[in-house]
């Protein structure tokens, strides 16, 4: 595994959830990585079996035709890719999660989609497919159109964010020094690292998911990518006003 070419160091983290930290941090070998990946795949098989038990129970109780089933994860995971382990990065492997939705008499059952979504979209989606009033106090959008037509699009981009230092290492101020905001469009991932106190951008990342789906080269500094970079920067600003300078006074004081 190699760190992405020209990626800023602030995008990295020490993977302490797996490796530990300080002088006791473990050294990882290729055999260790293979063992971890084997275990991770075994965990997926185990979860698949547990979901099967739930589906069997719904059938047994006669509830299958009156139940919406959703399976998802709260984050992705690194197992050595890009020299990282566990979570808390803004790369695709952390930001992208599984999401499976099944509704009664679903005509698109078994179909997959590449349409962009965020986890906050689940609430308005469930409200719509269950025939409940449309929520008015959520930033999420319903994914119901995609359940009918997997080629449909409801989002221009999906937003994720992670801080530096990560949640486990913020002493003594108990707040991060930077926040990393990232958006994924159909073709690219764009990330801005902003100073927590000033809101100023210190580093940028741009990855071409058409030609570089593993995010091995940061294109943010490439002159021929300037228009793509600025288009994504504008989109990030439109999607997440919190990342703009001046938002800080709106937060409650830190105790």
Image (spheres, rainbow, N blue to C red):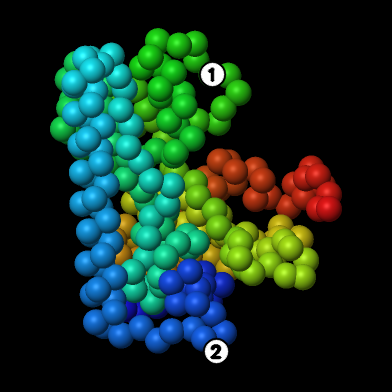
Q: Position of residue 102 (x, y in %)?
A: 26, 27
Task: Please determine whether, in this image, residue 9 is positioned above or below residue 201.
Answer: below
Regarding mark 1 in the picture, which secondary structure is present there? loop
Task: Please determine whether, in this image, residue 110 is positioned above or below residue 170.
Answer: above
Q: Position of residue 160 (x, y in %)?
A: 50, 50
Q: Position of residue 104 (x, y in %)?
A: 23, 17
Quickly name the residue at label 2.
23
Q: Is residue 88 left or right of residue 175?
A: left
Viewer-proximal residue among 83 and 229: 83
User: Looking at the image, can residue 124 be seen?
Assistant: yes
Q: Assess whether mark 2 and mark 1 are in contact (beta carbons under 8 angstroms).
A: no
Q: Quadrant of the N terminus?
A: bottom left
Q: Count the marks.
A: 2
Q: Which residue occupies 29% across, 70% down?
A: 36
Q: Is residue 223 left or right of residue 204?
A: left
Viewer-proximal residue among 112 and 215: 112
Viewer-proximal residue among 235 and 67: 67
Q: Which residue occupies 16% across, 32% down?
A: 110
Quickly name the residue at label 1.
135
Task: Please determine whether, in this image, residue 145 is positioned above or below residue 120.
Answer: above
Regarding mark 2 in the picture, which secondary structure is present there? helix
Toward the bottom, the furthest residue is 23
Q: Residues within 10 Å of mark 2 (few under 14, many from 20)?
A: few
Q: Which residue occupies 61% across, 61% down?
A: 167
Task: Please determine whether, in this image, residue 170 is positioned above or below residue 151.
Answer: below
Q: Position of residue 218 (x, y in %)?
A: 42, 70
Choose mark 1 or mark 2, whichever is in front.
2
Q: Residues within 10 Å of mark 1 (few under 14, many from 20)?
A: some
Q: Which residue occupies 45% across, 62% down?
A: 87
Mark nearer the N terminus (1 vs 2)? 2
What numbered label is drawn on residue 178? none
Report, in whole angstroms, how far the alpha carbon at label 1 lies from the one at label 2: 50 Å
């Amino acid at each position: 595994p190699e760190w992405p070419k020209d990626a800023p160091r602030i995008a990295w983290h020490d993977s302490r959830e797996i490796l530990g930290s300080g002088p006791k941090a473990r050294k990882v070998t290729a055999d260790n990585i293979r063992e971890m990946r084997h275990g991770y795949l075994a965990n997926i098989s185990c979860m698949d079996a547990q979901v099967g038990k739930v589906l069997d129970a719904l059938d047994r109780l006669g509830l299958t035709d009156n139940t919406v089933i959703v399976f998802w994860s709260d984050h992705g995971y690194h197992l050595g890719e890009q020299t990282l382990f566990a979570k808390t990065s803004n790369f695709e492997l952390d930001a992208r999660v599984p999401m499976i939705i099944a509704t009664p008499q679903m005509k698109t059952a078994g179909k997959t989609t590449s349409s962009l979504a965020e986890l906050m979209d689940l609430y308005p989606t469930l409200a719509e497919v269950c025939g409940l009033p449309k929520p008015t106090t959520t930033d999420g959008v319903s994914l119901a159109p995609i359940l009918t037509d997997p080629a449909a699009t409801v989002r221009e981009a999906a937003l994720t964010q992670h801080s530096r230092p990560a949640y486990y290492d913020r002493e003594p101020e108990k707040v991060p020094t930077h926040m990393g905001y990232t958006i994924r469009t159909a073709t690219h991932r764009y990330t801005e690292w902003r100073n927590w106190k000033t809101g100023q951008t210190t580093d940028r990342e741009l990855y071409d998911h058409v030609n570089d789906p593993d995010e091995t080269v940061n294109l943010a500094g490439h002159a021929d990518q300037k228009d793509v970079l600025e288009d994504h920067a504008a989109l990030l600003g439109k999607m997440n006003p919190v990342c703009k300078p001046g938002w800080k006074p709106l937060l409650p004081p830190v105790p």
